[in-house]
Amino acid sequence: MSIEWMLSKDLDKLKSLLFKESAYIALDLRGYLVSSEQFAELFWQAVTKEGARLSFVIGGAEGLPDSILEGASKRISLSPLTFTHQLTRLILVEQLYRSLEILKGSAYHK
């Protein structure tokens, strides 16, 4: 089985999942670097515009293909560093929690 075939199979599956979404945010090394406050604002705008359902797409070792990036409503970078999928998910969840705390005005953020 070739790597190209495996990637195309994964890409087709990802595209079919994203087709069901009204909008999604791509986590991309070349995306905008944002602060936690900017992430909170971006998160709030996306949730109020798109409703309660918001999806994030995390790329593989080679990043996300252009066809996925072009369909994203936003492209952001969590860091210029490279992380594993598991660590990226953890960082994303913490930033989502932090965003909620920033939006509430709690002391957690500082």
Image (cartoon, rainbow, N blue to C red):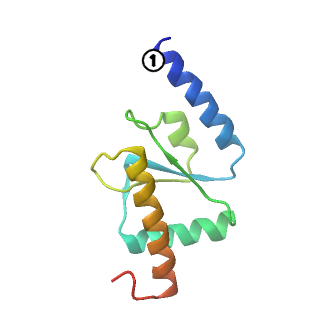
Q: Residue at x 37, y 35 (%)?
A: 61
For image coordinates 72% across by 45% down, the residue present is: 20
**Residue underneath mark 1:** 3
Under circle 1, the secondary element is helix
6 horizontally vs 81: left or right: right
Left-right relation of 16 to 25: right
Residue 17 on image: x %, y %: 67, 40
On the rendered structure, is 81 left or right of 72? left
Residue 16 to residue 56: above or below: above
Q: Residue at x 59, y 52 (%)?
A: 24
Which residue shows up at 54% across the image and 34% down it?
Answer: 67
Question: As drawn, which residue projects farthest toward the right?
Answer: 20
> Measured from the top left, where is residue 83 in percent x and y?
33, 47
Which residue is farthest left? 81
- Position of the C terminus by quadrant: bottom left
> In the picture provided, is 110 more to the left or to the right than 45?
left
Q: Residue type at mark 1? A: Ile
x then y, percent, for residue 14: 60, 36
Q: Quadrant of residue 35?
A: bottom left
Residue 58 place in picture, x, y as percent? 47, 45
Crowd around label 1: few <14 · some 14–19 · many ≥20 (10 Å): few
